[in-house]
Image (cartoon, helix red, strand yellow):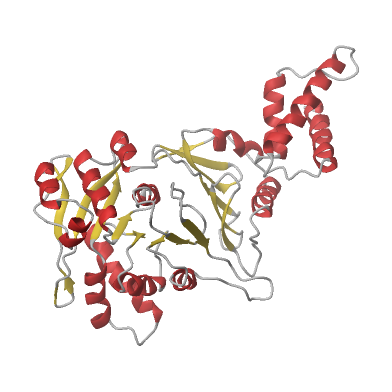
Amino acid sequence: MVAMAVLDAELRDAVRREQLDPQRDPHAVRRLAVALVREHDERSLTGAVPPVADPDAAVAELVARVAGFGPLQPHLDDPTVEEVWINSPDRVFVARSGRHELTNVVLTAEQVTELVERMLTSTGRRIDLSRPFVDAVLPAGHRVHVVLDGIARGFSAVNIRKFVMRAARLGALVECGTLTPAAARFLEASVRAGLNILVSGATQAGKTTLLNCLAGEIPGGERVISAEEVFEMRFPHPDWVALQTRPEGLEGTGEVRLRDLVKESLRMRPTRILVGEVRAEECLDLLLALNSGLPGMCTLHANSAREALTKACTLPLLAGENISARFVVPTVAASVDLVVHLALDPSGQRRVVEILAVPGRTEGDVIETEPVFEWSAGALRRGIGRPPRPERFARVGIDVSRLLHEAG
């Protein structure tokens, strides 16, 4: 422990001398740590300093202390861990394959505070008594959410959702068991045809991953603009601009909301618009964009595909008293073409359990739907429904009737 404390201090001095940003250049920090541990090991042969039992483990711990997040770093480096959260300093949990596990990590309140400060230093976002919540993205791509003590009882609550990209295209989701080959071919054709797709599901059901995979099927000749609260979408495309929100500054100004990004994206000559997650009144701006002939996709929290449509009809009402259901319901029916719903089963497997077509008709305040694929007898099977806008499929050379017949 004495040797590690000395090495820790020496490494921090070396980082300061070289004016490194530890979180943005962890490889340089590791290089310094390796050199320091090697030098310490050689000096220990003379008895001048206590030896280090395991040099490789010492290097890993030093890098975690200086460039990483201390005791949490091994879990962040573990590819099987999907999320890490701190309920209190002595109760740190991780999620693997959709299941929660209590770890043996025990922190102090001071360590939790230091970790939060270190996480936010490189993000440009802040948290204090006037703004006790924060969402940010770490340099490695992980999303961190913090709720300060006082709002959370007893201690600050920290969630780190790792960016674990196990699939970048729909074919990879088939290999993972999330999609069937027939459903994947249909969704790929729907994206190429320019249908408007709403991805729904519960937290951690895989909505963002599916949205990334759908976006990966967008033809390269299109210009894509995405809007998110924090950067989470990552997909290969040659002409893509990603936008994220910004909280207000110390003066109470400078806030950029998600609905601002949706409006601004329309001025950037998009041929496709993506919204990471629709939560509030920005749903109205997205519907207006989709209703103007601009194809798009988004995600939304819901318990089923039908409830996702109901929620899409409710959220625009938050935009103001002059927005009525008489306007919103037919607009949703005319704007949304498909709803793809995901679920997390008890074993932790993420699956697409429903693909619902929205033909554009309403009966009163109820939007008519048709199941293109539905969960039946333990599998995703072809339903009786057909997708809307067959002319869009024909325009890109896709025989959707044949495609669905083969799926059946």
Residue 275 visible to the viewer = yes
Viewer-proximal residue among 324 and 234: 234
Viewer-proximal residue among 271 and 345: 271
Viewer-proximal residue among 348 and 379: 379
Kindly give the residue lying farthest to the bottom in the view shown: 322
The residue depicted at 63 percent of the width and 76 percent of the height is 253
Q: Where is residue 209 in the image (x, y as percent from the top left)?
A: 39, 47
Name the image quarter holding the C terminus: top left
Q: In this view, does 56 lie above or below 97?
A: above
Number of marks in picture: 0
**Is residue 364 toward the left or the right of residue 20 in the image?**
left
Residue 304 visible to the viewer = no
Q: Position of residue 84 (x, y in %)?
A: 52, 43
Residue 390's image quarter? bottom left
Name the image quarter holding the N terminus: top right
Residue 369's image quarter? bottom left
The residue depicted at 56 percent of the width and 38 percent of the height is 76
The residue depicted at 48 percent of the width and 72 percent of the height is 264
Q: In this view, does 44 lie above or below 217?
A: above
Q: Position of residue 184 (x, y in %)?
A: 25, 44
Q: Position of residue 330 (x, y in %)?
A: 22, 76
The residue depicted at 43 percent of the width and 50 percent of the height is 237
Kindly give the residue lying farthest to the top in the view shown: 45
